Image: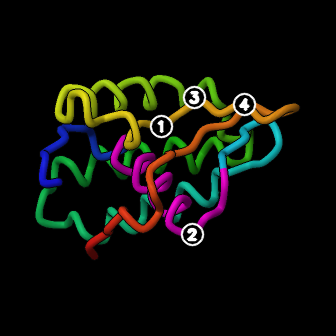
Amino acid sequence: MDELIKTTPSELGYYLWFCLRRTRRQGMVVFDENDYTVELIRTCRKIEDGMSANIQNLKDLQREVRKIDRGADQFQLQKDRFAPHRTRLNQSICRSLGEKARPFLIQTVQRKPWVGYELICDPDSIKIDP
């Protein structure tokens, strides 16, 4: 599938994080149980390294990473901070892919006693170019 999905650099960071977790078969993100801040920052830093040619997008991403970094000492990355990014990402994916979007959306998954988030596409269908 070669569809272009327009999103912000920070949302790209979130989506890449979910893609990497899916390819590594790490399971769903359960915000109430774990702190994912460091994991997300590492993913965003990978994007930073590859974006040096696009200065404005790099600055936007660095600003988002600094916000997350500053907050790492004060609070964990929580679902209320993630929710608007998830909404915008899913809307962008739906606009670009239409009916084919469902497996690529960040889904809410309920497995008692937890509610989490994950991609449901086949992990082998995800290709990440450096």
Residue 89 location in percent, x, y?
35, 33
Provide the secondary structure element on which disc 4 rests: strand
Q: Is residue 50 above or below residue 86?
A: below
Which residue is located at x 56 percent, y 44 percent? 118
Provide the secondary structure element on which disc 2 rests: loop
Q: CA distance from mark 3 to mark 1?
A: 15 Å
Residue 16 within the segment the image draws in magenta? yes
Badge number at residue 106 = 1
Would residue 128 be seen by someone viewing this image from the given angle?
yes
Q: Which residue is mark 4?
A: 110
Q: Which residue is mark 3?
A: 81
Residue 51 location in percent, x, y?
22, 63
Q: Is residue 22 above or below residue 56?
A: below
Q: Earlier in the sequence, mark 3 or mark 4?
A: 3
Q: Which residue is mark 2?
A: 24
Q: Identity of the amino acid at label 3?
A: Arg
Mark 3: few, some, or many residues within 10 Å (few <14, many ≥20)? few
Residue 97 location in percent, x, y?
20, 35
Q: Identity of the amino acid at label 2?
A: Arg
Q: CA distance from mark 4 to mark 2?
A: 20 Å
Labels 1, 4: front one: 4
Provide the secondary structure element on which disc 1 rests: strand
Q: CA distance from mark 3 to mark 2?
A: 24 Å
Mark 2: few, some, or many residues within 10 Å (few <14, many ≥20)? few
Q: Identity of the amino acid at label 1?
A: Ile
Labels 3, 2: front one: 2
**Side of 63 where 21 appears, left or right:** right
Provide the secondary structure element on which disc 3 rests: helix
Extent of the magenta region: 11-27
Q: CA distance from mark 3 to mark 4?
A: 19 Å
Q: Identity of the amino acid at label 4?
A: Gln
Badge number at residue 28 = none
